[in-house]
Image (tube, rainbow, N blue to C red):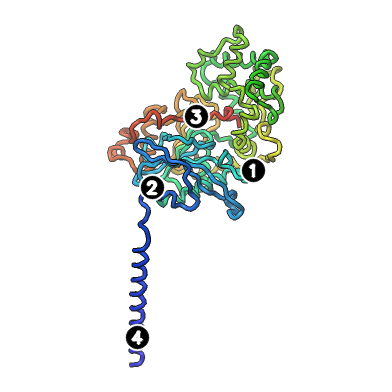
Amino acid sequence: MRKTLGWLLSLVVLIGTMGAAGSTAQAATAAEPAAATDIKDQVLGIPGMTLIEEKPYTGYRFFVLNYEQPVDHRQPWKGTFKQRLTLLHKDVSRPTVFFTSGYNVNPNPRRSEPTTIIDGNQVSLEYRFFTPSRPEPANWANLDIWQAASDQHRLFAELKKLYKKNWLATGGSKGGMTATYYERFYPRDMDGIVAYVAPNDVDNDKDAAYDRFFTKVGTKECRDKLNAVQREALVRRDALQVKYTEAAAQGGWTFTTVGDLDRAYEAVVLDYTWAFWQYSLVADCASVPVAATATDQQIWDTVDSISGFSAYTDQGLRTYTPYYYQAGTQLGSPDIKQPHLKGLSRYGYQPPRNFVPRDIPMTFQPGAMADIDSWVRDNARQMLFVNGQNDPWSAEPFRLGYGARDSYVMTAPGANHGANVAALQEGERVLATAKILKWAGVAPAATLADESKAAPLAKPDANLDQRDVERAAQLRR
C-alpha cells in the first residue's frame, strides 16, 4: 500500500510539473515575436551575416552581403574576416546554384548558365584574399584551395537551412577549378558540379600539351600571322618601349613587382598569341595586322587590345596578387616554348613568382594538383566539365577514370575560354542540359522520358545572363 501511494504521489507531482512547464512554454511562445518570413530577415538571421545593400531586379531579390569567416578553418579561434557574397533569390522552393569566379564577386545581378537552366537561386562568393575579402593583416599561408573550399562549405551549411532543395556548384576558368576543388574536399555538399574551362595542371614541370596546342589551334595562316606580330613587337622593342614609357607616365604606372618596364613589356608581348586564342575566334584573325607592313602604332594597338600593356604594371597586378600567389604555390603555371621568338626573348615565359611582391613568401606544393586529378578520375559523381576546343587552358583538361559515375567531359567546337553548354554540339548540349536538370531535381516529366526534350527552364534575360569572362592578365598562372 505504501508503495502504491508513493507511486501515485510521484505521478501527481510529475503531471503538475508538466502542466506548469507547458503553461510557462505557452506564455513564452506568446511573448516571442513571430519567426522571420521575409527572405532578407531569414538570411540576416544567420550568425555573422550582414547586409551591404539590396538591389531591385524584376522577378528576384538581389542582396550584396558580408559573411564572417575564420581566417584559418583549422584554427577558427585565431580571428575572422568578412567575405563578400551576393544572393540572387528567386524562391526557397527552387534549387540553388553556388557560383564562384575564383576572383572578385560581381556586385551586380548576374545569372550563370546552370542557374538559367534550372531556373533557380544563385549564391556567388568572392574568393578569399581578393579585396575587400582579405584578412588584415594578411597571412598568405592561409590562402589555399582547402581553405577556400572550407569557406564554401561553411556558408553552404548555413544557407542550406533556408534553401533546402538541391544545390549545384559552378564556375568558369579559376571558378571551374574552385567548384572542382570544393567537390573534392566536401563531396557530400553538392548534388552536381558544372565546371567550365577548368585547367588541370597535374604536373607543373610538364607543359608539352600547351606546346602541341599552339602548333594545331585554328588555321596555319592565323597562327603564322599572330606569331609574326609577336616577333615584330620584339624586333621593334626600342621604338615601342618609347610608347610604353609615355603610356606609363600618363597612367601613373610603375613596375616594382615585375622588376622594370622591359620585363613587363616582354611579358605582355609573350602573352599575345595565348590571349588571342583565349578570348578570340578564328574569324577575328582578319583584324590582326600584317606584321611586315604594319606601322609601329598598329603593332602597339593590336598587342594592347589583346594582351593589355597595363597588365604587368604594379597597378594591373595588384588585383590579381592572390591568383598569382596560388599559381606559384599550388595551381601551377604553363611554361610554353615559343621557338619563333628565339634570339629575341630575353626572359621567356616568366613564372608567377615574378608577379607577386617579394615580401610575400611562396613555396610550391607539387602534390596539390596531383591529388585533385587523382580524386576526380576515381571519385567523380555527377560532374560535368565543359571545355573550349580553341581555348589554351583546355589543353590540359580534367579526365575521368573507371571510378567516375554519371560524369562527363565535353568540348565545344571552335569555342574559346567562354565555352558553355549552349555552344556544345546538339547531342552533347541536350545531354548536358538534361543532366543539370536531373541533378538539380527539376527535370520535367518530358525530359525524364526523353532527354532530347531538355531545355533551360528560365526565360533568357540579356542583362542577367551576361557572362563575365575573367581577364586576369591572361590567367597566366
Name, please, the residue furthest toward the front.
31
Horizontal side of 360 relative to 283 (left or right) equals right
Residue identifier under label 3 = 469
Give the residue type at disc 2. Ile
Q: Earlier in the sequence, mark 4 or mark 2?
A: 4
Check if mark 1's residue and mark 4's residue have beta carbons within 8 Å: no
- C-alpha separation, residue under disc 2 versus residue under disc 1: 35 Å
Q: Residues within 10 Å of mark 2 (few under 14, many from 20)?
A: some
Q: Which mark is residue 39?
A: 2
Q: Residues within 10 Å of mark 1 (few under 14, many from 20)?
A: some
Q: Earlier in the sequence, mark 1 or mark 4?
A: 4
Q: Secondary structure at mark 3?
A: loop
Q: Residues within 10 Å of mark 4 (few under 14, many from 20)?
A: few
Residue identifier under label 4 = 9
Depth-wise, is mark 4 or mark 2 nearer the camera? 2
Give the residue type at disc 4. Leu
Q: Earlier in the sequence, mark 3 or mark 2?
A: 2
Residue 205 horizontal/vertical position (percent): 65, 33
Give the residue type at disc 1. Trp
Depth-wise, is mark 2 or mark 1 nearer the camera? 2
Residue identifier under label 1 = 140
Residue plotted at (40% across, 27% down):
425
Q: Secondary structure at mark 4?
A: helix
Residue plotted at (68% across, 13% down):
239
Give the residue type at disc 3. Val
Q: Earlier in the sequence, mark 2 or mark 1?
A: 2
Residue plotted at (34% across, 71% down):
23
Residue 340 horizontal/vertical position (percent): 64, 17
Q: Quadrant of residue 412?
A: top left
Depth-wise, is mark 4 or mark 3 nearer the camera? 4
